[in-house]
Amino acid sequence: MSRPSQLKLTTTDHNGVSVIQSQAHASSSSSLPAAVAGLQQVPQLVPTNPSAGGGKALPPSKMKKPPADKDSEEYRQRRERNNLAVKKSRMRSKQKAMDTQQRVNELKEENERLEAKIKLLSKELSVLKDLFLEHAHNLADNVQPATRYAPGAHCVCV
Amino acid sequence: MSRPSQLKLTTTDHNGVSVIQSQAHASSSSSLPAAVAGLQQVPQLVPTNPSAGGGKALPPSKMKKPPADKDSEEYRQRRERNNLAVKKSRMRSKQKAMDTQQRVNELKEENERLEAKIKLLSKELSVLKDLFLEHAHNLADNVQPATRYAPGAHCVCV
DNA sequence: CGGGATTGCGCAATGG
DNA sequence: TCCATTGCGCAATCCC
C-alpha cells in the first residue's frame, strides 16, 4: 500500500531562530583540507514528541533524545562518523552517475556499430538478390522463352 | 598563475569560536518542528584579509566583505535566494540523472532490436549463399539433369 | 536499540 | 551583481 516514507515538509522556513553557539574546543575534526567550511549548524527545537497521533502500543519508554549536547564527546563522535558516511555515500552516488553516463556512451557506440553492420548486411543481401534476379532472367530466356516474368518479378530459390 | 583560490586556513586548533546568536523572535508558526531543518549555520571566522599577497592591479575599491551580518536584512535575502537556486540546481541535477538512466534503458532496447535484425539478415544471407552454392554445383555438374537439387533444397520462383 | 546509508537542507566559496 | 554549481556539515530517516 502507500508508503508514507517521505514526509512532505513544506519548508517555508523563515528561520528566525535564536541560537546560542558556544563551542570553544579544538575540534578534532579530521583535518579537512578546506577547513574552509568550518560551520556549524545549530539544531532547532526538536519536538520531543512523546505521544504521537495514533501511537498507542508502544511501551512508555523514556524516549529521551536530549538536545544533542554539542559539547558531548559522544556527539562529536557521532557527527564525525556521519560526516564520513555522508561523504562516502555521495562519492558513490557521483560515481554511479558517471558510470551511467559512460554506459550511455558505450551503448551509443555499440549502436552505431550494429547499425553499420546492418547496413553492410543489407547491402550484401541486396547484391545477392540482384544476382539471383539476373540468373533467373537468364534461365527464363534460355529455357523457357514462353514463360516470361513480368517486370519486377523475382526468382528466388530457397 | 598562482591562484590563492583555496584558502588554507590552518585551523590548527583554536577553532574554538563562540558565537551568540540571539534573535528571540516570536517564532510564531515557524517553531514548526516539522520544518525539520530549521537550522542555522554559524559562520566561522572569515579572514577579512585585506592585504593579500600579490594583489596589486585591482583599484583600491572599498573591498567590503562584512562578515556576513546575519542580522542584515540583505543577508537574509541573499541567503534565501541562494537556497532557492540551490534547490533548483539540485532538482535539475536529479532530473538529469534520471534522464540518463532512462536513456540507458532506451539504448539497451534499441540494441536488442538491432541485434535481432542482424540475426535475421544474417540468416537470410546465409540461406541465399547456400542457394548460390547449390546452383553453382548444378551448373558445374552439368547443364542437363534437370531437378537435381539436394534433399531439402527448394526452388521457389516468385 | 545501535549504527551505517540516504536524503533534504542550509551555508559559503566559486564559477560564469 | 546575480544566478548556478559544488563541497560540506547537520539532522532526520531509512534500513539492517
Image (spheres, coloured by chain):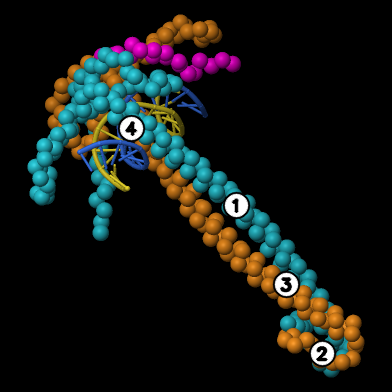
Chain colours: A cyan, B orange, C blue, D yellow
In percent of width and height, residue B151 lies at 75, 88
Answer yes or no: are tags 3 and 1 on the same subunit. Answer: no
Q: Which residue is mark 1?
A: A108
Q: Residue at x 23, y 20 (%)?
A: A71
The answer to whether the residue labelled 3 contacts the one labelled 2, judged by CB atoms less than 8 Å apart, is no
Which chain does the residue under circle 4 lie in? A
Picture layout, residue A1 above or below residue B16 = below
Q: Where is B66 relative to B95, above or below? A: above
Tell whether A106 sits left or right of B100: right
- Say whether residue A44 is visible: yes
Quote the CA–CA distance across marks 4 and 1: 39 Å
Marks 1 and 2 sit apart, C-alpha to C-alpha, by: 49 Å
Which residue was labeled with disc 4?
A: A82
Percent from the top left, x then y, of residue A84?
Answer: 38, 31
Q: Nearer the viewer, mark 3 or mark 4?
A: 4
Are dots 1 and 2 on a single chain? Answer: no
Q: Amino acid at mark 1?
A: Lys
Give the residue type that dot 4 points to. Asn
B16 is within the stretch colored magenta: yes
Q: Are marks 3 and 4 on the same chain?
A: no
Would you identify the image quadrant in which residue B136 lies? bottom right
Q: Disc 2 sits on a residue from what chain?
A: B
Can residue A53 be seen here?
A: no
Q: Position of residue A41 (x, y in %)?
A: 28, 25
Residue at image point 61% right, 63% down = B114
Q: Mark 3 or 2 closer to N-term?
A: 3
In the image, residue B114 above or below residue A60: below
